[in-house]
């Protein structure tokens, strides 16, 4: 069974940096589990790692799609599985880093996404409905009626997942929550070591606010304007990312910049809260409390390295690197 390391956690918790430094220690390569970093030209709003920050560590699933293209969990799983195969064949260890729990779960448990469980015509009708006034709310209420359990996992503002769930029910006659529960009962398809970087809410929210301010300073408005000028639709998957839809609303004159920034910060905090909920109680993930460390950027990957050695995940001789 192929080995993978998973580094999960809420946004702004330091996953990317930890993945890079741990990869230097274990001979790893990073696979991004971020739903927006796959897109070219979307760098600032996704806090995409730069070439310099990669420190020579190969990264996968970054800048692989045009912002005009669709990206979902099924596409992610296919690309991630291919990257894992490639990395493993070259004798390295895949290190998956990201906060999208459903994506990570799909890879770890080999969740099957039946391509036949779709109805493009019905999906188009739902997408048209979503663009109308009160459309998103009506679709969410319909899903709550047909599959209330799925609404515990799908946020009402995640219209893409709401539509996908309704489409699945329409195409198969089965609740998507039942399908997902059955898939979760499968054993892992990889030999995985998982880490969850946690932190105090106050410290995390402070870093989120600071990160958003830095994004604005670095030119997030210009980045979003460039995408819109290219013709990327506001309704596209790429433009639904946090930061992009809010700045698009500002550029369209719907809200002012201060309101857009506040919405990004609030949305990011809510997203972080959902990430906490997803990972915090998973017994198969080794929890790391960020606020325990004076130098978390260095000490957290060192703890991960020790854990991998102590548990036998990495055997003597597989990695003799030292933190530089």
Image (cartoon, rainbow, N blue to C red):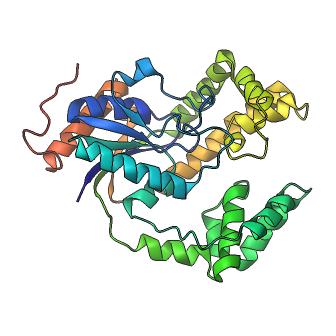
The residue under the point 85% across, 59% down is 128
In the rendered image, the vertical position of residue 247 relative to residue 274, given as above or below: above
In the rendered image, the vertical position of residue 100 relative to residue 46, given as above or below: below
In the rendered image, the vertical position of residue 314 relative to residue 168, given as above or below: above
Q: From this viewpoint, is residue 280 visible?
A: no
The residue under the point 75% across, 38% down is 245
Q: Position of residue 34 (x, y in %)?
A: 52, 42
In the rendered image, the vertical position of residue 152 relative to residue 31, given as above or below: below
Q: From this viewpoint, is residue 127 visible?
A: yes
Drawn side of residue 43 relative to residue 291, left or right: right
Rendered-image quadrant of the C terminus: top left
Drawn side of residue 17 relative to residue 250, left or right: left
The residue under the point 75% across, 77% down is 145
Residue found at the far bottom of this picture: 173
The residue under the point 28% across, 33% down is 22
Rendered-image quadrant of the N terminus: bottom left
Rendered image quadrant of residue 197:
top left
Drawn side of residue 38 relative to residue 161, left or right: left
How many marks the image carries: the answer is 0
Nearest the eye: 99 or 30: 30
Q: Position of residue 33 (x, y in %)?
A: 47, 45
Rendered image quadrant of residue 142:
bottom right
Q: Where is residue 90 in the image (x, y as percent from the top left)?
A: 23, 41
Q: Where is residue 254 in the image (x, y as percent from the top left)?
A: 90, 35
């Amino acid at each position: 069974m192929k080995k993978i390391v998973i580094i999960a956690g809420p946004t702004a918790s330091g996953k990317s940096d930890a993945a890079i430094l741990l990869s230097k220690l274990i001979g790893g390569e990073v696979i991004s589990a971020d739903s927006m970093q796959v897109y070219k030209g979307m760098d600032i709003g996704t806090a995409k790692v730069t070439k310099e920050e990669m420190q020579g560590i190969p990264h996968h699933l970054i800048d692989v799609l045009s912002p005009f293209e669709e990206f979902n969990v099924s596409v992610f799983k296919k690309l991630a599985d291919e990257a894992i195969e490639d990395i493993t064949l070259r004798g390295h260890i895949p290190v998956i880093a990201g906060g999208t729990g459903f994506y990570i779960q799909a890879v770890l448990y080999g969740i099957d996404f039946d391509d036949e469980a779709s109805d493009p015509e019905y999906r188009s009708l739902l997408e048209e409905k979503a663009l109308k006034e009160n459309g998103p709310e009506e679709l969410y209420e319909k899903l709550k009626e047909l599959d209330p359990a799925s609404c515990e996992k799908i946020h009402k503002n995640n219209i893409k997942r709401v539509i996908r769930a309704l489409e699945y029910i329409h195409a198969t006659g089965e609740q998507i929550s039942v399908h997902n529960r059955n898939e979760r009962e499968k054993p892992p398809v990889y030999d995985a070591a998982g880490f969850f970087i946690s932190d105090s809410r106050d410290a995390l929210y402070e870093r989120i606010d600071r990160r958003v301010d830095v994004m604005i300073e670095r030119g997030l408005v210009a980045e979003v304007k460039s995408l819109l000028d290219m013709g990327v639709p506001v309704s596209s998957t790429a433009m639904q990312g946090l930061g992009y839809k809010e700045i698009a609303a500002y550029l369209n004159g719907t809200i002012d910049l201060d309101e857009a920034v506040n919405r990004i910060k609030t949305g990011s905090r809510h997203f972080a809260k959902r990430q906490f909920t997803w990972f915090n109680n998973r017994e198969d993930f080794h929890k790391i409390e960020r606020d325990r460390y004076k130098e978390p950027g260095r000490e957290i990957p060192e703890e991960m390295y020790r854990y991998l050695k102590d548990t036998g995940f990495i055997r003597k001789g597989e990695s003799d690197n030292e933190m530089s």
